[in-house]
Image (tube, rainbow, N blue to C red):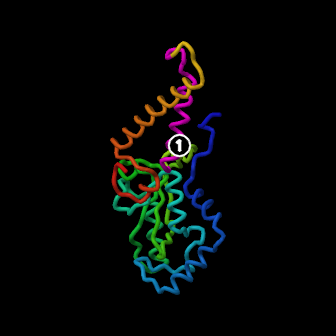
Amino acid sequence: MNVNTLPKTNIEKALKRYRAHNQKDHFIQLKGLINALNISTLNSFDLDLLSKDRIYHIDEIKKVCIDYRLRFLDIKYFKNELPQDALTQITQLEEAHQTQVGELKIMAPSALFRLKKTDDPLLFAPLGNEYYYLVHKWGNDLHPLRKVMMWPFKNIWNLLAVVFLFSWLLTELTPIQLFTRTPDNSTYWMLLFFIFKAVASVVLYFGFALGKNFNPAIWNSRYDKA
């Protein structure tokens, strides 16, 4: 299978899929919460003028960030410039709702908060009660296998599972006769354990040396090396 023929990952569509799993009507729930709690936010939007499809809860945003190893940070940490289309969307929101749009956030891969790249950023404005409004999406969609490639970094158990699988493949490719003249099951398992320990040590060493962390710990972290 040629990876280049696979459709790229559209993060906005991924958000919609996660939201579809939740049977609650987010739009009605949001209106009720804001009216009941009388929340006052910087972005005083008229909810009746907002598009229901563009409203997301922080839990949905967090889930996508963890699965695809993305960040959700204040716009001040974003190293790229907003495109003209995004600025136009902000202006149109301000005119339609007679308010000043502020406290904007960006969902994007970590690299976009360090370098100037164009990988699928999403611009959000807070609505209150941990709900956000998708203002604009631009750039290129993500690699079609990004979710699979980021799976080992979701937690320590996923990482160890991948390390074990890689160690098993190395064990299968290693001639046991190099270590003993009478190979048996115990020799095989000893070799597997030795290779697993060696690979795990290298992975953990470079992980700590580079200051890396797992997806749930970095999705809203502003530190570069996280």
Say if 1 sits above or below 74 in the image.
Answer: above
Q: Residues within 10 Å of mark 1 (few under 14, many from 20)?
A: few
Identify the element where label 1 is drawn.
helix
Say if 189 sits above or below 117 in the image.
Answer: above
* Residue 226 painted magenta: no
Quadrant occupied by the N terminus: top right
In front: 129, or 189?
189
Task: Identify the residue at image location x=61%, y=64%.
Answer: 19
- Disc count in the image? 1
Residue type at mark 1 is Met
* Residue 164 painted magenta: yes
The outermost residue toward the top is: 181
- Quadrant in the rendering for residue 30: bottom right
- Quadrant in the rendering for residue 144: top right
Q: Main secondary structure of the magenta part?
A: helix
Residue 109 point in image, percent of width and height = 45, 51
Say if 143 sits above or below 123 in the image.
Answer: above
Give the magenta range. Answer: 154-179
In front: 13, or 94?
13
Residue 130 point in image, percent of width and height = 48, 72
Task: Identify the residue at image location x=37%, y=51%.
Answer: 226
Q: Which residue is mark 1?
A: 149
Residue 207 point in image, percent of width and height = 39, 42
In front: 134, or 201?
201
In front: 100, or 92?
100
Task: Identify the residue at image location x=48%, y=79%.
Answer: 45
